């Protein structure tokens, strides 16, 4: 956008009153049409223009007591970064953001702002909340595209060394904070590319790889050492790392998929969402034969589950050329944990939602490949421990669906490798490492943990907030030696 247009937009809101701000409609982000995007892996939302961003920012009432900050796990000063946007001062806006969050381009795309900061926006009481996440994405993209990236200040070197295991959102966040505090950080990543779940779990059309790698590159410029294809628990252990490092931070996430344990789950063509998405995202199966990691013709697909991972799997299947994609979920639309935006995108793209259904059996052909899925209809009973109404089978309602591929996306438990190979570390009943959520301290001196390895499968921003607490805990330990 030309500078004159930005100036005109700024001037248009110069003397606007609070009442007039509330009448500005929430700016809708442009996106690829569904008929076009379903045939490519390009990003779906296209981002705000500068004019849209300034207009949206002017909806913010600059509350004296900004409740939106309370909804942010990393406590970004939301009114501050938004006010800079209203002035057209995008550089100051991104600098304000990065005091709290070093991964704004990622968070602006994948964090569930509608249930966090935006849920507490005062405007929501009378209309729609300020599009905080979209504004966060805007300033992050502006910084990257305009070459105005300013490295954060780093404290004098402390002489202390920290090993960070895992380069997902928790690992990257803690590494950034620790480097800024003057410590030397080495990040150990099991895969051949950094980014963790941001790379292998989230499709290109929702979070482009170049965005993640750009953030990792900044960390490396800050001084982080990155060791790829290094599986801690196989190539050395936490105990051996403690011989070389002053502290170890475990951020290995929740990488062990759940299955339903029903007949036929071992048939060819039945994938966990982890494997299905990793093949596509990290190994770039969608660019076969340029990248030689094919997934066989997906044909008729059934995706089991109602979360974001299920939506990602269903929408990926469409882009791989599926003949038909069913989403099988045992509750109703109201109970689906996926973001509304992701469900709406899936609906627009043609996913067939079979709600209040549950698979009970898979059958295959003579070659052992899945060909049918037997389902049963469900109805909702009383609420369970999650607060959602419990699904109850409707006796005698069984029916079959023809399928060639099944993707099971019903959740994950923490990666078990490090807990199994680390002495003196306490693990919970579900395989999670037990750690103090305020300090990240585990039962083993010098070892900290945060993110999904502690919380179980959660959101990117929750893992980041947890990791920031742990980084502060590590810093205090390195200074005092107290456990």
Image: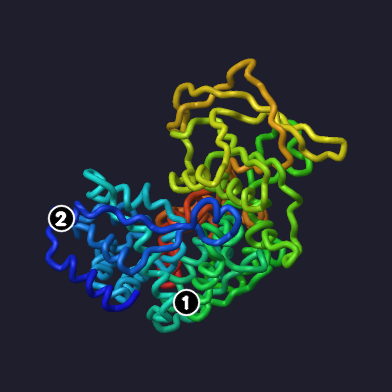
Would you call the spot at circle 1 few (<14 residues within 10 Å), some (14-19), or many (20 or more)?
many
Determine the secondary structure under disc 2.
helix
Q: Is residue 407 above or below residue 213?
A: above
Q: Position of residue 47 (x, y in %)?
A: 41, 63
Quarter of the picture containing the N terminus is bottom left
Residue at figure coordinates x 56%, y 56% from the top left: 202
Q: Residue furthest top?
A: 396
Q: Position of residue 138 (x, y in %)?
A: 38, 66
The residue mark sitting in front, 2 or 1, is: 2
Would you call the spot at circle 2 few (<14 residues within 10 Å), some (14-19), or many (20 or more)?
few
Q: Residue furthest right?
A: 366
> To which quarter of the image does residue 409 belong?
top right
Residue pointed to by mark 1: 183
Mark 2 → mark 1, Cα distance in angstroms: 48 Å
Residue at figure coordinates x 23%, y 58% from the top left: 60
Q: Is residue 150 left or right of residue 125?
A: right
Q: Position of residue 200 (x, y in %)?
A: 61, 59
Residue 416 in sight in this render: no
Residue at figure coordinates x 57%, y 77% from the top left: 225
Q: Nearer the viewer, residue 114 or 161?
A: 114
Residue pointed to by mark 2: 20
Q: Is residue 259 left or right of residue 25?
A: right
Q: Nearer the viewer, residue 408 or 24?
A: 24
Quarter of the picture containing the C terminus is bottom left
Q: Is residue 334 left or right of residue 391?
A: left
Q: Upstream in the sequence, badge 2 or badge 1?
A: 2
Q: Nearer the viewer, residue 33 or 223?
A: 33
Q: Nearer the viewer, residue 351 or 330?
A: 351
Determine the secondary structure under disc 1.
loop
């Amino acid at each position: 956008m030309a500078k004159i247009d930005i100036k005109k937009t700024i001037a248009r809101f110069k003397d606007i009153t609070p009442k007039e701000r509330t009448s500005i409609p929430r700016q809708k982000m442009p996106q690829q049409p569904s008929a076009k995007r379903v045939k490519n892996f390009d990003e779906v939302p296209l981002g705000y223009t500068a004019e849209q961003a300034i207009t949206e920012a002017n909806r913010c009432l600059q509350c004296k007591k900004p409740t939106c900050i309370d909804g942010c796990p990393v406590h970004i000063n939301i009114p501050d970064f938004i006010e800079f946007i209203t002035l057209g001062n995008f550089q100051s806006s991104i600098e304000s953001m990065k005091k709290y969050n070093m991964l704004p381009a990622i968070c602006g795309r994948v964090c569930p702002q509608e249930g966090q900061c935006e849920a507490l926006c005062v405007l929501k009481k009378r209309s729609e909340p300020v599009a905080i996440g979209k504004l966060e994405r805007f300033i992050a993209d502006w910084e990257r595209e305009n070459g105005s990236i300013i490295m954060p200040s780093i404290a004098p070197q402390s002489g202390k060394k920290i090993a960070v295991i895992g380069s997902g959102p928790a690992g990257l966040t803690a590494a950034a904070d620790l480097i800024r505090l003057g410590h030397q950080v080495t990040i150990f990543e099991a895969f051949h590319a950094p980014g963790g779940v941001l790379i292998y779990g989230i499709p290109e059309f929702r979070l482009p790889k170049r965005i993640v790698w750009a953030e990792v590159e900044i960390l490396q410029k800050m001084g982080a050492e990155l060791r790829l294809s290094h599986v801690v628990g196989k190539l050395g252990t936490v105990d051996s790392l403690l011989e070389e490092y002053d502290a170890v931070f475990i951020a290995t996430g929740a990488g062990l998929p759940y299955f339903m344990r029903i007949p036929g789950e071992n048939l060819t063509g039945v994938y966990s969402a982890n494997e299905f998405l990793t093949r596509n995202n990290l190994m770039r199966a969608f660019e076969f034969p340029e990248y030689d990691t094919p997934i066989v013709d997906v044909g008729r697909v059934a995706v089991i589950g109602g979360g974001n991972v299920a939506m990602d799997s269903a929408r990926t299947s469409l882009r791989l050329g599926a003949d038909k994609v069913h989403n099988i979920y045992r509750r109703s639309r109201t109970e689906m944990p996926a973001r509304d935006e992701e469900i709406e995108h899936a609906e627009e793209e043609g996913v067939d939602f079979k709600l209040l259904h549950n698979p009970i059996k898979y059958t295959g052909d003579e070659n052992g490949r899945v060909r049918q899925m037997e389902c049963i209809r469900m109805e909702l009973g009383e609420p369970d421990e999650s607060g959602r109404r419990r699904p109850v089978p409707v006796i005698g309602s069984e029916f079959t669906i023809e399928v060639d591929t099944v993707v099971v996306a019903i959740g994950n438990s923490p990666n078990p490798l490090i807990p199994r190979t680390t002495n003196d570390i306490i693990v919970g009943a579900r395989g999670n490492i037990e750690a103090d959520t305020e300090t990240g301290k585990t039962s083993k001196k010098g070892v900290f943990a945060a993110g999904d390895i502690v919380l179980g499968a959660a959101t990117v921003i929750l893992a980041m907030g947890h990791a920031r607490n742990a980084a502060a805990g590590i810093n205090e330990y390195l200074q005092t030696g107290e456990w």
